[in-house]
Amino acid sequence: MEKTSITLSREVLSGIDRISDARKSRSAFIENVLRQYLRERAKAERRARDLSIPNKYADELNRDAEDGVEDQAPEQD
């Protein structure tokens, strides 16, 4: 663990004190909140990266699908 100092408003500290477990320190509460935030942020980045792969090829895949449908459609006289 590294020690650091941060400045928080009285309002934020009051909110932390109101909702945190009295048996844990403010530091533990803030660390848990930040860990959760970092996990969610990493998950969002993975989702965005995963979505970018099919999106990169979406136009080509859509054209291929349209060509396949056209090939299957019966010819009209």
Image (cartoon, grey):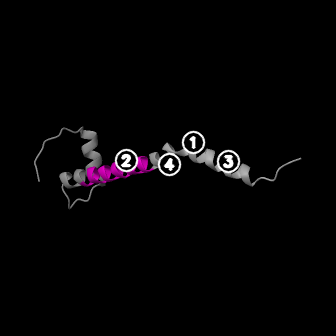
> Mark 1 belongs to which amino acid?
Asp
Estimate the spatial distance between the alpha carbons at disc 3 and disc 1, rounded to whole Å: 12 Å
Nearest the eye: 68 or 49:
68
Residue 1 is marked as none
Element under label 3?
helix
Q: Residue at x 22, y 39 (%)?
A: 8
Marks 4/2 in contact by CB < 8 Å: the verdict is no
Query: In the displayed image of the protein, which residue is found farthest to the right?
Result: 77
Q: Which residues make up the magenta segment?
A: 32-50
Marks 2 and 3, the one that precedes in the sequence: 2
Nearest the eye: 75 or 24:
75
Specify whether residue 58 is painted magenta: no
Marks 4 and 2, the one that precedes in the sequence: 2
Q: Is residue 37 left or right of residue 54?
A: left
Estimate the spatial distance between the alpha carbons at disc 4 and disc 2, rounded to whole Å: 15 Å
Q: Residue at x 28, y 52 (%)?
A: 33
| Residue 13 drawn at (x, y percent) | 24, 44
Disc tally is 4
Q: Is residue 23 left or right of residue 39?
A: left
Residue labelled with disc 2: 45
Marks 3 and 1, the one that precedes in the sequence: 1
> Mark 3 belongs to which amino acid?
Asp
Estimate the spatial distance between the alpha carbons at disc 2 and disc 3, rounded to whole Å: 34 Å
Element under label 4?
helix
